[in-house]
Image (cartoon, helix red, strand yellow):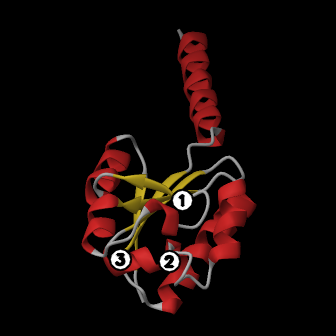
């Protein structure tokens, strides 16, 4: 009986250690600000996470005034975004915000994708296990 209890406890501990080592780093960033500090923050945070956890799944959803981050004519972070896209970070622009601001897909930085609704995109990511970070300054 003692062996069975010991074996069960050892198996349970092994399962906990194995699942703790499994990489399940998924984060969606929510950016609505055109504040350069907030925009630098999301770029820095995504870069640091990717450096420490290359297999992390990261997505930056921009809408409202945050759309400036991914516009060719307004972004001071175009090179950093291109680098992060190559590392697998997804940048998604809200089509509702684009319509309101009369922005076309051709005005977005290369590699930036669009989604029909930024808020809905964030909700869907959370439903699939993504952590949520609101980027604000």
| Residue 72 rendering spot, x and y as whole percentages | 56, 75
Pointer 1 residue:
112
Q: Earlier in the sequence, mark 2 or mark 3?
A: 3
Q: Earlier in the sequence, mark 1 or mark 3?
A: 3
Seen in the picture, residue 52 relative to 21 is either above or below; the reply is: below
Question: Marks 1 and 2: in contact by CB < 8 Å?
Answer: no
Q: Is mark 1 on a helix, strand or loop?
A: loop
Q: Residue at horizontal 55%, vertical 26%? A: 12
Q: Which of marks 2 and 1 is nearer the N terminus?
A: 2
Q: Looking at this view, is 39 or 100 the one in front?
A: 100
Pointer 3 residue:
32
- Cα separation, mark 2 vs mark 3, equals 9 Å
Q: Residue at horizontal 66%, vertical 41%? A: 21
Numbered mark located on residue 69 in the image:
2
| Residue 130 rendering spot, x and y as whole percentages | 43, 50
Q: Looking at this view, is 90 or 114 the one in front?
A: 114
Name which quarter of the figure residue 94 lies in.
bottom left
- Give the class, few, some or many, for how many residues have Cα within 10 Å of label 2's Cα (few <14, many ≥20): many
- Cα separation, mark 2 vs mark 1, equals 10 Å
């Amino acid at each position: 009986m003692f062996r069975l209890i010991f074996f069960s406890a050892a198996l349970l501990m092994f399962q906990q250690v194995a699942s703790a080592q499994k990489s399940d780093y998924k984060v969606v960033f929510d950016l609505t600000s055109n504040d350069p500090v907030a925009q630098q923050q999301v770029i820095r945070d995504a870069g640091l996470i990717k450096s420490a956890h290359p297999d992390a799944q990261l997505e930056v959803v921009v809408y409202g005034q945050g759309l400036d981050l991914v516009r060719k004519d307004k972004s001071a972070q175009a090179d950093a975004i291109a680098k992060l896209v190559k590392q697998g970070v997804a940048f998604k622009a809200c089509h509702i915000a684009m319509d309101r601001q009369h922005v076309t897909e051709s005005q977005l930085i290369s590699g930036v994708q669009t989604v029909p609704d930024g808020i809905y995109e964030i909700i869907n990511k959370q439903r699939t296990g993504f952590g949520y970070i609101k980027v604000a300054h």
